[in-house]
Image (cartoon, rainbow, N blue to C red):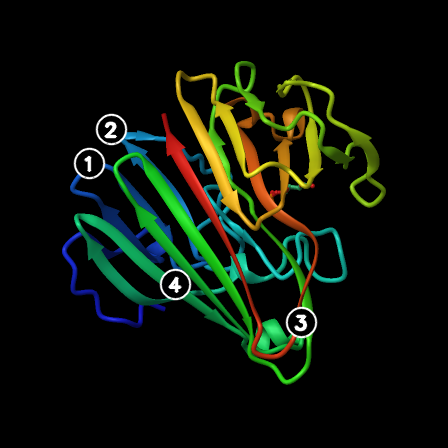
């Protein structure tokens, strides 16, 4: 829950949908963001009042099911795998442990530690710190996972980013030459391939992992916005659009996800850190 007291005027703890605690960030440069402690999920990133993220209309805010939209965490498993699809980090409460105002830009840090619930499916002690910074036209996140256990552990993870888009006009560039694991038609038996296209579009159902993706991708959301998705250490990417399996909303978003598909192995006291920087051109 919202544990640390907030002393900066551009970070406010408010009541979100379903009365869930929500952090509102406002930058002196005019941009805004909203983050739910439930799932540590950024649900809104607005530049010039335009929201570049998307929350599905079927998203629930009951503090039980993950929030389907924005930037949900997949940890400690991207999935499919031994535990629930996308892990537990997106359906537990994170805590606010720090907030700062850095020259008019709000910076917050959320924390997640193991609990009896997490240990019931993944029996390790860990610390996850998630720093979110809002600048004029960028939203940056830094995720740091530390092994606080006495035994090694391994995990996979992703930031399952939902971008608002017009699916017929949305294009992603930067993926040509990557090795692909196409999860269509069977997510449990992905088909290996290689991306040959300069420009990747979403003409139908898309569910594809890109291994060793570049540190910078470009998304044209088909609504007139060009967004750069930069990362350090995420290493892989995923494109997803459910097409007719989500008839009510598939036309309005695409997921461009930074992911770590191969296992990250951490010895006790070791940490892994990855950053994502979303910038509106
Ligand atoms: O759990 P959500 O938000 O509905 O997303 C599910 C999808 O998430 C994508 O990241 C996966 O590649 C898909 O296989 C999966 O179906």
Q: Find the distance from the CA under tag 4 to the CA under tag 1.
A: 23 Å
Q: Which is nearer the eye, 268 or 253?
A: 268
Q: What residue would you read off at disc 4? A: 110
Mark 1 CB near ligand 1 (8 Å cut): no
The residue labelled by disc 3 is 122
Q: Classify 10 Å Cα crowding around label 1: few (below 14), some (14-19), many (20 and above).
A: some
Q: Mark 1 falls on what kind of element?
A: loop
Give the mark nearest the N terminus, 3 or 1. 1
Pick whichever of labels 4 and 1 is earlier in the sequence: 1
Label 3 to label 1: alpha-carbon separation = 41 Å
* Mark 1 in CB contact with mark 2 (< 8 angstroms): yes
Q: Residue at x 24, y 28 (%)?
A: 48
Are circles 3 and 1 on residues that touch, CB within 8 Å?
no
Residue at image coords 57%, 23%: 173
Q: Which residue is mark 2?
A: 48
Judging depth in this view, the residue of 64 and 204 nearest the camera is: 204
184 or 236, which lies in front?
A: 236
Residue 8 lies in quadrant: bottom left
Q: From this view, report whether residue 163 is shown above or below residue 6.
A: above
Percent x, y for residue 249? 53, 27
Q: Residue at x 64, y 30 (%)?
A: 242
Coordinates of residue 240 in the picture (x, y in percent): 63, 33
Distance of mark 4 from mark 3, alpha carbons?
21 Å
């Amino acid at each position: 829950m919202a544990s640390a007291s907030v002393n900066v005027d551009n970070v406010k703890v408010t009541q979100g949908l379903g009365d869930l605690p929500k952090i509102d960030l406002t930058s002196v440069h005019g941009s805004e963001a909203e983050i739910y402690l439930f799932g540590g999920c950024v649900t809104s990133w607005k530049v010039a009042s335009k929201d570049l993220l998307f929350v599905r209309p079927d998203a629930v805010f009951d503090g039980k099911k993950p929030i389907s939209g924005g930037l949900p965490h997949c940890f400690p498993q991207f999935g499919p795998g031994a535990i629930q699809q996308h892990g537990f980090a997106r359906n537990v409460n994170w805590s606010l442990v720090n907030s700062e105002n850095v020259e008019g830009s709000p910076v917050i840090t959320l924390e997640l530690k193991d609990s009896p619930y997490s240990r019931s499916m993944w029996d390790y002690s860990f610390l996850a710190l998630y720093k979110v910074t809002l600048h004029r036209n960028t939203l940056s996140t830094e995720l740091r996972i530390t092994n606080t256990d006495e035994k090694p552990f391994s995990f996979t993870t992703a930031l399952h980013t939902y971008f608002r888009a017009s699916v017929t006009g949305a294009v992603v560039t930067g993926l040509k030459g990557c090795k692909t694991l196409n999860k269509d038609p069977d997510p449990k038996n992905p088909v290996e391939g290689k991306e040959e296209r300069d420009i990747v579009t979403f003409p139908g159902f898309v569910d594809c992992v890109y291994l060793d993706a570049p540190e910078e991708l470009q998304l044209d959301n088909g609504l007139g916005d060009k967004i750069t998705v930069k990362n350090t250490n995420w290493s892989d990417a995923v494109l997803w659009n459910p097409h007719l399996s989500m008839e009510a909303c598939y036309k309005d978003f695409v997921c461009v996800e930074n992911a770590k598909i191969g296992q990250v192995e951490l010895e006790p006291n070791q940490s892994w850190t990855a950053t994502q920087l979303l910038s509106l051109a």
